[in-house]
Image: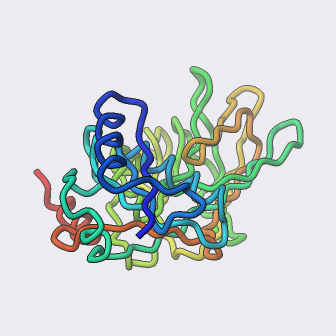
Amino acid sequence: MRIAFACADTDEARAARTRLVHRYGNAMPDEADVIVALGGDGFLLETLHRALTRDRERPTPVYGMNRGSVGFLLNAYREEDLAERIVASQHVRLHPLRMIATRVNGERVEALGINEVSLLRETRQAAKLRITIDGVVRLPELICDGALVATPAGSTAYNLSAHGPIVPLNAGVLALTPISAFRPRRWRGALLPHAARITFDVMEESKRPVSAVADFTEVREVLQVEVQECREVGLTLLFDPELNFEERILKEQFAP
């Protein structure tokens, strides 16, 4: 098995990579059978995006080991029997969201979000958004700090912090969640079919500027943002079978 090791820019992650490379060798990422990411959840997302950049059609599977803080998307760190753990791991297929953001100046920016696509107010003024689903206006006006669309994999991240629902991987839905909604005050968001096409139109864009973010790509002063699941792109995450990702998401719904 050809393993490529990638690490976050921390002393703990770099030291772990040095020990593992000495023990297992280190393949080039574009020649590896698997990439082992050493860091936290944020670094794992970076590693997945780099795998997409190298080969969008067949990105290399990623097996993460926690050398960060929370490590929700990562396996426990152990140096022994790594190849055997990877062979026995369970494969989870993830599909990112495609964001197409149109700026006020007419520029269009496309990016992928593995966790979520979020819209955020840029100034002290609340954002004012119109939300359209599959060509039908569902919410004519949402006054808020922002809104986001989360994948099942990302539903336990920013989405959960914004009081959105946790979505099981096989549920076939996306979470649409407002961020600090002011009007309608009681609207808590929606669960949408995974194939839904979601369009956010920014109202009063000069007075209430809004930015759009797909994971690490931020676009300032947007006028419209379209979001849809990108089924033609698939990423593979590897998890130890004793605590697989589906079980982690289920368990998180009962956490105190």
Residue 30 in the figure: left or right of residue 111: left
- Is residue 205 visible in the rendered structure shown here? yes
Colouring style? rainbow
Question: Which image quadrant is residue 103 in?
Answer: top right
Q: Where does residue 175 sit, x and y in percent of width and height?
A: 45, 62
In the depicted structure, whether residue 147 falls above or below residue 122: below
Q: Tell me what residue is drawn at x 31 percent, y 69 percent.
A: 86
In the depicted structure, whether residue 85 falls above or below residue 76: below
Q: Tell me what residue is drawn at x 51 percent, y 64 percent.
A: 32
Figure disc tally: 0
Q: Among all residues in the image, which is located at the extreme right?
A: 106
Question: Which image quadrant is residue 249 in?
Answer: bottom left
Nearest to the observer: residue 76 or residue 140: 76
Q: Among all residues in the image, which is located at the extreme top?
A: 124
- Is residue 73 visible in the rendered structure shown here? no
Q: Among all residues in the image, which is located at the extreme left?
A: 256
In the depicted structure, whether residue 122 falls above or below residue 44: above
Residue 81 in the figure: left or right of residue 141: left
Nearest to the observer: residue 43 or residue 227: 43
Nearest to the observer: residue 115 or residue 138: 115
Quarter in which the N terminus is drawn:
bottom left
Q: Tell me what residue is drawn at x 51 percent, y 68 percent.
A: 235
Q: Where does residue 238 sit, x and y in percent of width and height?
A: 36, 68
